[in-house]
Image (cartoon, rainbow, N blue to C red):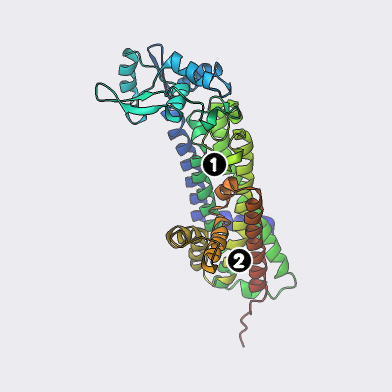
Amino acid sequence: MFRTEIYRILSRKMVVAAMTAAFLLVMYYGLGNTVWREGVIDEGKVYDKTEAIARDKEITAEFSGVLTEDTVRAIWDKYGAPADEAKRGTYDVMEQRAVQGTKENYCNRFVARTFAELIQGEGGDAVYVLPEDLSQSPYLQGEYYFGYAGNGWDGYWDMYLVAYVLTCIVIVVALAPMFAEDYACGAADIILPTVKGRGRLWLVRNGIGCCFASLYYWLLCGGLLLEQLYFYGTEGLQVSCKIAYMPMFFPENAAPLGRGLVMLYLAGWFAVLVLVGVVQCVSAKSKQSFGALVWSVLIYIGPFAVMRVVLDAMPMEMVNALGMVNVILHYICYSTPFSYPGSFMQAPGNARLLLTGIAAAAALAGALLGSYSYCHHQVETTR
């Protein structure tokens, strides 16, 4: 039965096409926004792509460790200000700046965007200037670890979000017809009257749905992680989440990126399993595969859209009933599969438990409601 159900999923050309397209898009996006955009100017020479990554690692190794004001000023004294991020330009433009003696690497770019001020220079161009007093910067309180992250880890949250959303869309496309097509083609009238055609089939299909979703989640999102590890190595996993732009609850900003990635991936996996329960519930209640697909997509994206368009415009003060209801609705929306991974990362401990509890309750409710709908389907009989 397991092989039969897997074959049913993979025999649909649309599912295979969606799986392949999502995987290729994520891998291409991972390269196009990281490795292919890397560039270093050092000692009058321009490095790009993998050569830039290797050179950046060599440069950053000298300054790796707990971030201090001395580290920041040492980087600035040695390499000076990079070009304005908006004017970095192409390889040819970087070659022109290399002739002019400009130095650009991960270290001085980090200092420029984190500590420096962009002001109008004498020639009319915008230039970076490092303030004389940096003592109040939250980065320099002895908690943050600095090291080479590059575009691969600095932009990892955005890349993961793309991979995660595409994974969920593929899961919806693959699983939405699972029960609905039984009704559409009349198979339910044959399967359900059998001795083991109700409860057992429901359990098997839910298990298959969870296995398929888990395998594809780790294939796509895990493949993205392996791609970045291959090009950028493991050095960036020690860098603090705040420095690598990984969203975290603010007292945990100094935690290493590796810990943040573990939390993010486990949260995403949990959300994917919740999505399976919800989609299969919709499928069990739908009489047509297309209807199940449409409703599953709406349930996946709808809460986030409603929250941004409607709920965010309403008051959230806890002093009145309307505000309390709005807060509760926000928590429900944040706990849906679309929003859960990011919300979990940025929430405090108690809120994480609440979000997880709401998501788990939704999955359980979906399983119970879907099971009841499918197992109590009234088989049509002919006289």
Q: Secondary structure at mark 2?
A: helix
The foreground one among 178 and 75 is: 75
**Callout 2 amino acid:** Cys
Q: Quadrant of the C terminus?
A: bottom right
Residue 345 locus on image (x, y percent): 59, 45
Q: In the shown orientation, is residue 268 left or right of residue 114? A: right
Q: In the shown orientation, is residue 219 left or right of residue 137? A: right
- Residue 122 lies, with reference to residue 167, above or below; the image says above
The answer to whether one can see residue 312 in this image is yes
Crowd band around label 2 with a 10 angstrom C-alpha radius: few (<14), some (14–19), many (20+): many
The foreground one among 258 and 20 is: 258
Quick one: which residue is furthest to the bottom in this view?
Answer: 383
Disc number lying in front (2 or 1): 1
Residue 175 locus on image (x, y percent): 57, 59
Q: Earlier in the sequence, mark 2 or mark 1?
A: 1
Q: Which mark is residue 281?
A: 2
The answer to whether one can see residue 57 in this image is no
Q: Which residue shows up at 50% across the image and 49% down it?
A: 166
Q: Quadrant of the N terminus?
A: bottom right
The mark tally for this picture is 2
Q: Secondary structure at mark 1?
A: loop
**Callout 1 amino acid:** Pro
Residue 283 locus on image (x, y percent): 57, 66
Crowd band around label 1 with a 10 angstrom C-alpha radius: few (<14), some (14–19), many (20+): some
- Residue 199 lies, with reference to residue 348, above or below; the image says below
Distance from the alpha carbon under mark 2 to that under mark 1: 32 Å
Quadrant of res 325: bottom right
Q: Which mark is residue 247?
A: 1
